[in-house]
Image: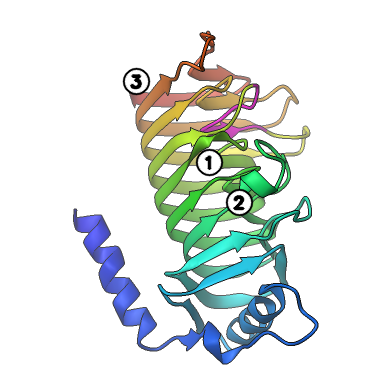
Amino acid sequence: NTMDKGIADAHSQLASIAINISSFPIIAPEIDDAGRLERALEYVSTNHGILLVPTDTTLTVDSVTLTDKTNFKILVEGTLKRRAGGTSKGMIILLNCHDVDIWLNADGNVANNGVTLNEHQHILSIGGGSSKIRLHQIIAKNPAGDIIYLNDCNDVYGGHILGYGEDTGRNTLTIVKGKRMQFDKITSIGVGTEPMPCGVDLEPNSVTDTIKDIQFGNVYVESIGTGGFSLSNGKGADCQGITANSVIVHKKTQIGTEWSRIGISVTGFKHVKVNEI
């Protein structure tokens, strides 16, 4: 379709001017690719450039954090794969980062990180006051936690978000705190294990966690979990202004058991509008 063609064209243009991860080799005694990825991200974020992980490259990493960086791009055409036995943190963590563009292919490697669930082992975690984050295309499989976890960030754009697994992890998208976000297309298939929310979950952790002005285009969720498209505010936080064009939730049958769960739920949110369910 037109969106996917636009993404492919952008990939081609950016790849021609990007810094290749191959310019940053592993340095002994490093046991995975986290060190070289951290050095590469530090370089491109400091110099406001573009990092390319090409299609023939798989980087095995545990967790890499960038703090206080602006105006850079991450283009992963290959794969970022979670190291076996990783820590309970995001694979890529952005804190107080601004004006960032991301295209990402990732593998949460849940089979070697909790088997079905490690709640805090997110693939992409963004917060600490970050803003102007553009998630053009995120394709991720086998999560142990969330594929995208947003806590304290504003002005986020999501183009094509695709998460899939074998009933593992927590959610494809979680929003804890943030304002002014737009997600064009979210597809979540087999992400989330019972009794996790699964799919898309907007849920503040405290009364100060404001969630406002969030727009969704088309959302499709298949899961065995307790939710699918869940807006849950039990903290008395200021949560309002959530719109969606279309939300479809398909509750799957787990072998031998019928999970009778609510697919779409709204609790404690104001001014919510879904055009088609």
Which residue is rendered at x = 58% and y = 70% of the image? 59
Mark 3 or 2: in front is: 2
Q: Which residue is mark 2?
A: 109
Q: Which is nearer the eye, 147 or 273? A: 147
Mark 1 or 2: in front is: 2
Provide the residue span drawn in magenta. Answer: 195-203
Number of dots carrying numbers: 3
Q: Which of marks 2 and 1 precedes in the sequence?
A: 2
Q: Which residue is mark 3?
A: 277
Q: Secondary structure at mark 2?
A: loop
Q: Which residue is mark 1?
A: 172
Measured Cα–Cα span from mark 1 to mark 3 = 19 Å
Residue type for callout 1:
Thr
Measured Cα–Cα span from mark 1 to mark 2 = 15 Å
Note whether residue 181 is visible. yes
Residue type for callout 2:
Asn
Q: Which is nearer the eye, 136 or 222? A: 222
